[in-house]
Image (cartoon, rainbow, N blue to C red):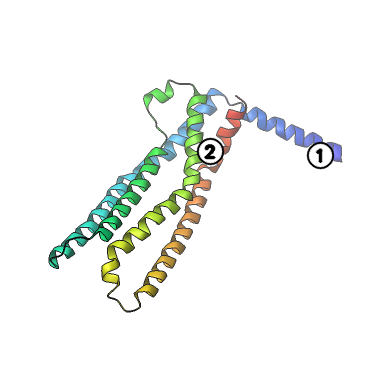
Amino acid sequence: MDNLRQIWTKLHEAQMGIEALMTPQSTESLIQQVKQEEQKRKRYTKWMIPTTVLIVIGISSIVLFSKQLSNTSIDSWQLSGLILIVLGVVWMIGQFVYTQIPFQESNYEQQSTTFLQLAYQKLQLRKQLTVWGSIIYLLLLIPGILMVAWVNLQKIPGYLGIIGLTIGIMFGLAGYIIWVEQKKFNRTYGNILQKIKRFLSHE
């Protein structure tokens, strides 16, 4: 019985190896699959990036307008907060753009192996950034918002408790979003990554 199980295991491994030696047609199909997912991702950026930029402009405008109404100048604390918010937005957009897989005509003129290696690297980095990228974004955004609102927060009774509660809620929400994004990534790209890995390991 053990011998039969070993034979079956070897046959299964051999079958997986044969499947990994992909034909040009199956390789093209895999590339098209990656392209379709990237096109969906690009459609997401059409509203994500402009909306984020508008939010930052809105926050900056509110701060400057409130300062103008109170006839006071923006202090270094609030200015530093605005800079952190802007850096957070630049980080978020930058990592999104940097991990985008470039689909150009030249991609189809190069070897499939070269292109799939690039796609694999971009997707692996994107998977890591669903966690670390989000954490860095929060470490820039949360202090930035608190620094901008600090002058007004101090006027509220029990403001330290409010700040602690706000930070806790934001990190809890961030943890949930990271968990959702990881599940979404594995559902969308998990099978694609496995296929690319099998293909590259048999090149």
- Quarter of the image with the N terminus in it: top right
Q: Quadrant of the C terminus?
A: top right
Of the image marks 1 and 2, the number of the one nearer the N terminus: 1
Q: Residue 98 appears in which quarter of the rendering?
A: top left
Q: Is residue 29 visible?
A: no
Name above or below for residue 40 compared with residue 14. below
Whether 74 is drawn above or below 107: the answer is below
Residue at figure coordinates x 51%, y 30% from the top left: 117
**Other residues around mark 2 within 10 Å, as few (<14) / some (14–19) / many (≥20):** some
Q: Residue at x 33, y 49 (%)?
A: 87
Query: Percent x, y for residue 70?
Result: 14, 68
Is residue 53 something that shows in the picture?
Answer: yes
Q: Secondary structure at mark 2?
A: helix
Q: Is residue 100 left or right of residue 6?
A: left
Spatial separation of the CA atoms under disc 1 and disc 2? 29 Å
Q: Nearer the viewer, residue 175 or 71?
A: 71
Residue 201, percent from left and from top: 61, 29
The amino acid at mark 1 is: Arg
Residue drawn at (26%, 68%) of the image: 151
User: Dot 1 corresponds to which residue?
Assistant: 5
Q: Position of residue 195 (x, y in %)?
A: 57, 35
Q: Amino acid at mark 2?
A: Ile
Determine which residue is flagged by label 2: 192
Secondary structure at numbered mark 1 = helix
